[in-house]
Amino acid sequence: MNDFSYIKAENLEHATREIQTPETKIVAGGTNLIDLMKYFVVNPESLMDVNAISELKEIKTTESGSLVLGALASNAETAYHPAVEEKYPLLSQAILAGASAQIRNMASNGGNLLQKTRCYYFYDPHVPCNKRIPGSGCPAKTGFNRMHAILGHSEDCIAVFPSDMCVALAALNAVVHITGNSGNRTVPFSEFHLLPGNTPHIDNVLKDNEIIIGIELPDEDFSSQYSYLKIRERSSYAFALISVATAFKMNYNVISEARIALGGVAHKPWRNGDAETYLKGKPASEEHFAKAADIILKDASAFKHNEYKIKLAKKAIVRNCKMALDLSSHRVGAKPSL
Amino acid sequence: MNEKNLQKVQMTINGSPQTLEIKPWVSLLDALRHHLHLTGTKKGCDHGQCGACTVLVDGKRVLSCLTLAVMKDGADTKTIEGIGSAENLHPLQQAFIKHDAFQCGYCTPGQICSAIGLLDEGKAQTREEVQDLMSGNLCRCGANRGIMNAIMEVKNAEL
C-alpha cells in the first residue's frame, strides 16, 4: 500500500475536525479498507484511526424503546448482544451469515455500511471502472458478471452491494445517525445507499466530512416470524449469489405486515413496497409468496453470466417466506431449508 | 509524525512487552514475522481470505494480515509461539496430533489460534456450528475432518 500518515482520533470532535479533506480516510476495523489499500484501489494520504472513541462502541436502548448500535461496536458484539438476539434476531442471523468469525470480531457496524463492492473489475486498478474512475467504462457489463446485479443497475455500473447485515437493516427500517461539521442528521436506511445511475463513484449519502455514529433499530417486534437465507456457492465464507431477509407480523394465519429485502441483486439492499403491500392482509401461503416474488422481480434484467439469478431469487424469496414461519427450519450459516 | 514517518508501537506479545518503530503501513502479520522474528504465524493469502494469519488480540481471534500494527498500540497479543510448549502441549495441540489434524502444517497455527478463540467465545455447540465458526480457516491439504475431530474432543472435554 502507499505511504500514508497515521492519526489517532482522541474523540469525536477531533475526528470530525480532521476529516475535512477527502484525502483522509477513517479506519475502524479495517477489514475492507486495508484490503482495498493492499490492492492499491484506495490510496489515502492519511488514515485516521477512530477506535479510541469509546462512546461509539456502545449498544443501548433509548427512552423510546429503540435500540442504537454504536458505529464502532463490532459486528460480532452486535450479533451476540442479548438485546439484538432477543428483539432483532433477524439482524443477528444476517450478521452471522457474513464473512468469518475473525472478520466479524474486527469489523465495525459503521464500516459494514461503507464497505465497497467486490466486483472484480472495481478491485483491479489496472482495468477501467466507472466507480473507480468516472467515465472510464464498465468492463463487467460484457465481462464475467456472475455475481452482478439484476435490479437497479445502470449503463455505467452493474455492481452489487455485498453486505448481509445491511439486508437485515433494510428490512428492519433502521435509521443511520450521522455527525459532521454541519451538525447531526439521520437518514432512513433505504435512503443511505444509492443506485449507481450515472454517478457510480458515489455509493451512499455520507459526505466526505461526515462520520456515522450509530444505527438505530425502531421499537418494532419482528422476532417471531423472520428468516435470513443466503444462497452461495459454498456453505460458508462466501458472498451471496442471492440473499433474502424476511420478517412478518401475523394475525393468526394472515400477514398483517411483511418485510422482504434482497441482497446480491443490486447496488443496495432491495426492497419493494408493492410486494409488501400485496402481502398485507393475505394468508401466508406459497401462492401469495410466489406472487410477491413476481412483483419484486418484475423489472429484473440480467447479463450474460447472471441470468440464473432471476429464477433463483424468486425461489429464494418463496422459500425464505416459508422459513420465516417456522423458526425450527433455520440452519447455521443461513443455509437453505424446507 | 517524524520525517521518516515511523510510529512507536508498544504491545505485549505472548506476555512480553515489545516496542517497535515502524511505518504505519506495516501489518501486524509482518510486524510479528519480520520485526519480531515470530514466524509461527503464517502469511497465506495476505488478504483476509484464508485465516492462516489468525492470532489472538486482547483475547479475540483476528486476522493479522488486515490489521495495521500501529493500530494495536497497547494491545495484548498471543501467537502460536505463546500456546503451550514442547514439554507442555496445549490440549488442542495434543488433540491435533492425535486426530491427524495437519499435513503440511501451514494452516495449523492459524487453526489452533482460531480454535482457541472459538472455545473462548463459547458460542459453538454442535459440530455443524463448530464447522461454521471455523469456516474462516482454510486447509488445502484436506485435514478438515481431523481438525474438527480435534476441536470437538477438546470442546467436549471442557464441558
Image (spheres, grey):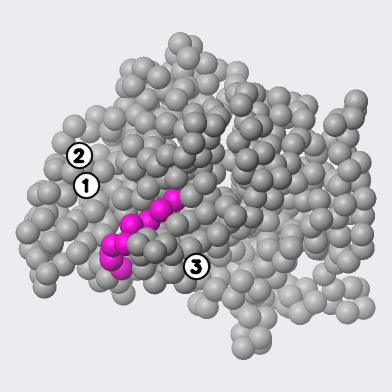
Can you say whether B24 is above or below A257 in the image? above
In this rendered view, identify the residue nearer to me: A211 or B121.
A211
Can you say whether A45 is above or below B22 in the image? above
**Circles 1, 2 touching at the beta carbon (< 8 Å):** yes
Residue neighbourhood size for the residue with mark 3, other residues' Cα within 10 Å, grouped as few (<14), some (14–19), many (≥20): some
Mark number for residue A101?
Answer: none
> Mark 3: which secondary structure?
loop
Upstream in the sequence, badge 1 or badge 2? Answer: 2
Which region is colored magenta?
A: A215-223
Q: Is residue A104 visible?
A: no
In this rendered view, identify the residue nearer to me: A287 or B101.
A287
Mark number for residue A314?
Answer: 1
- Residue B32 spot, x, y in % from top left: 85, 50
In this rendered view, identify the residue nearer to me: A104 or B85.
A104
Q: Residue at x 42, y 39 (%)?
A: A185
Spatial separation of the CA atoms under disc 3 and disc 1: 32 Å
Upstream in the sequence, badge 2 or badge 3? Answer: 3
Upstream in the sequence, badge 3 or badge 1? Answer: 3
Q: Which residue in the protein does label 2 denote?
A: A297
Q: Is residue A181 left or right of residue A261?
A: right
Residue neighbourhood size for the residue with mark 2, other residues' Cα within 10 Å, grouped as few (<14), some (14–19), many (≥20): some
> Mark 2: which secondary structure?
loop
**Camera-nearest label, 3 or 1:** 3
What main secondary structure does the magenta stretch of the protein show? Answer: loop
Q: Which residue in the protein does label 3 denote?
A: A81
Is A102 part of what is drawn in magenta?
no
Three-letter amino acid code of the residue under disc 3: His
Can you say whether A305 is above or below B109 in the image? above
